[in-house]
Image: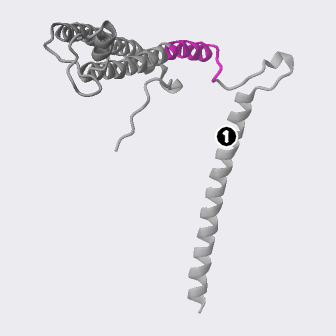
Amino acid sequence: MKEEKDPTIVDRYSLDTEWEIQPNLRMHAGSDQAEVADEIRDKKAYLKFRTAQISFEYNTGHRKIKDEAGEDVKKPTVGTLKSAVESNEELYKLEKEINKLQKKLDICASYTVAIDQKKYALQDEVKLYQGGYYSTPTVPNNEGGRDYKKEMEAITEKSEESDAREKVQARRKKKVEDEWSVHSTLSK
């Protein structure tokens, strides 16, 4: 299974690609957040509408309020009506749906903030790159410092030369051994 990359993490080795996808990430995060917020507004409006309907049904007698004994309440008080509406199961389920959507909205909002923070991190990474933060360290020679780049090149050249010498020596040794083995078999 292919592991997906977290879009909030900056890959400093591909800043050009990161900058290309940054606006799309922000747009998608913002649109997801707006969609969830719109859904919450719709659910809240429906909850308000259903609350009014149910309250009206209790007030007109289309819905009956039961007392503790299970008998219908003939003349419900304002407090009894309010309690009956608040304890309605349908309205409770709507409230739970709104709470779940609110959680989703909070997650979308934090993702949007993370994408915005990634933008600032990308800006700082580019500044570091432009300033030579990731380059080979050098000290100007006029101050008596060392040029690490030249030293590394010299070391690399020496190691390449010694590798070539070792290969030549190994070939010569093998040739001599082969000649001795041929000579020793002939002398027997």
Q: Residue at x 70, y 43 (%)?
A: 158
Q: Nearer the viewer, residue 89 or 131?
A: 89
- Where does the image place residue 112, in percent across and percent down from the top left? 43, 15
Q: Which class describes the residues within 10 Å of circle 1: few (<14), some (14-19), or many (20+)? A: few
Q: Residue at x 26, y 8 (%)?
A: 48
What amino acid type should be assigned to the residue bearing mark 1? Glu
Relative to residue 3, is residue 38 drawn left or right? left
Residue 81: quarter of image: top left
Quick check: is 66 in the magenta stretch? no
- Where does the image place residue 37, in percent across and percent down from the top left? 33, 11
Q: Residue at x 59, y 93 (%)?
A: 188
Relative to residue 22, is residue 124 drawn left or right? right
Residue 186: quarter of image: bottom right
Quick check: is 118 in the magenta stretch? yes
Relative to residue 14, is residue 70 drawn left or right? left
Tag 1 secondary structure:
helix
Q: Nearer the viewer, residue 115 or 167?
A: 115
78 over 68 or under it: above or below: above
Q: Tell me which segment is drawn in magenta.
A: 117-134
- Where does the image place residue 3, in percent across and percent down from the top left? 39, 39
- Where does the image place residue 12, in percent across and percent down from the top left? 53, 24
Question: Residue at the left extreme?
Answer: 62
Q: How many marks?
A: 1
Relative to residue 142, is residue 154 drawn left or right? left
Residue 19: quarter of image: top left
Which residue is label 1 attached to? 157
